[in-house]
Amino acid sequence: MYDVVVVGGGPSGATAAEDLVRSGHSVALIDRAGRIKPCGGAIPPRLIRDFDIPDDLLVAKIYTARMISPTGRMVDIPIENGFVGMVDREDFDEFLRARAAQAGASRLTGTFQKIEREGGVTRVLYRDKATGETESIETRLVIGADGARSTVARAEVPGGDKIPYVIAYHEIIKAPGKIGNYDPERCDVIYDGAISPDFYGWVFPHGKSASVGMGSLVKDVDLKQATAALRQSSGLAECETIRREGAPIPLKPLDRWDNGRDVVLAGDAAGVVAPSSGEGIFYAMAGGRVAAMAASAYLTSGRVRDLQLARKLFMREHKTVFKVLQSMQDAYYHSDERRERFVSLCHDVDVQRLTFEGYMNKKLVTRRPMAHVKIGLKNLAHLTGLVSPVHT
């Protein structure tokens, strides 16, 4: 009998498992081997601090972000007073799983099947990868951290089968040094309807390799063709492809993260990916941490309402940021004319500073109120067409 079975060993599940065992609980972590999520791999300084990420896990350090508009306008935004770390998800996720195991979690490799309940006992069934047999383990609580199309969420949590998502696709390629328009110390974000009609494309350095990809909610978009166009425009078309990956990325946090009984969700399963940016690693790990807090409270008190703490704690800190980012996505992502205006707005130094201060520390910047007023007026002018996107 485990206190908790965590389904899914990505950043969210591994974080929840480690936090729980360090709090004195018995934990089993079930993960499918061999799956790597498509991801640009950017992690901000707050993640590195909060989750004690060692420097040698960073495959690159980024000091500039470049925004590229549909007409090819380029705005380079320096990252002041620090850097953005880059990780390769294959190594990063395994590091987190191994760290959870070193702390005391039992690692199980297999595919989750279902939850059964009988005589007051909750059992998790999974197919063991080594034997192919269905195994059963007993637990007091289940944390579903098994991704955007979470099997746990669909079966156990109201609304878990209706989460909207975009499909993300990327290619990891060999890209040593500067090649064409590619800079190993700069992240490029491409806002162009020819690449993605409703999201964006990216070229993110990973040291000796790079992640080139895009995402879209539009079903008939050719993800591979769009990525090939990105590689061509960046001078990376002839680089060797190491691997290709695609997966759904959720667009909105679920209204409920628990089943009021013995299940709580975390990470992509709960829908915690930032709108507009699509950033997920920090929010997944933050979601895993609050799920562990809620689980620990429930295990201590026996009150099922304590499972609601996971969503309450997460939204208390991040709800406003998500609302602002969603408003920005709704305003600017649905036409090339709006994308052009968005990149033009990024010329503004106040926009750059407030944006990256917020990104680096994962909270809205409340000081410098006049800068917020100035940005609001410029934003309104662009959205109403009072200024031309050629003006900065």
Image (cartoon, grey):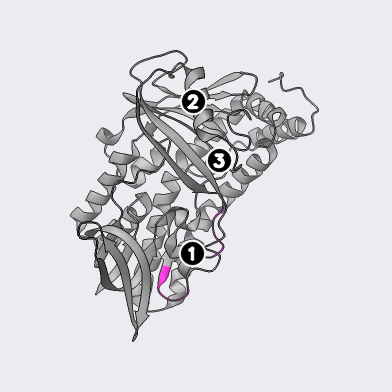
The answer to whether 47 appears left or right of 314 in the picture is left
Within 10 Å of the Cα at label 3, are there few (<14), some (14-19), or many (20+) other Cα atoms? some
* Residue type, mark 2 in image: Ala
Where does residue 145 sit, x and y in percent of width and height?
39, 58
- Residue position for label 1: 154
- Residue position for label 3: 365
Q: Would residue 108 be seen by someone viewing this image from the given angle?
A: yes
Residue 328 found in image quarter:
top right
* Residue type, mark 1 in image: Arg
Q: Which mark is residue 111?
A: none
Q: Earlier in the sequence, mark 2 or mark 1?
A: 1
* Residue type, mark 3 in image: Val
The answer to whether 354 appears left or right of 382 in the picture is left
Residue 140 found in image quarter:
bottom left
Say what secondary structure mark 1 lies in. Answer: helix
- Residue position for label 2: 228
Within 10 Å of the Cα at label 1, are there few (<14), some (14-19), or many (20+) other Cα atoms? some
- Magenta residues (range): 251-263
Residue at (69, 27) in percent of width and height: 341
Residue at (76, 22) in percent of width and height: 388
Which residue of the protein is positioned furthest toward the bottom in this rendering?
Answer: 119
- Whole-angstrom CA distance, mark 2 to mark 3, is 37 Å
Question: Closer to the camera: disc 2 or disc 1?
Answer: 2
The answer to whether 167 appears left or right of 243 in the picture is right
Residue 6 found in image quarter:
bottom left
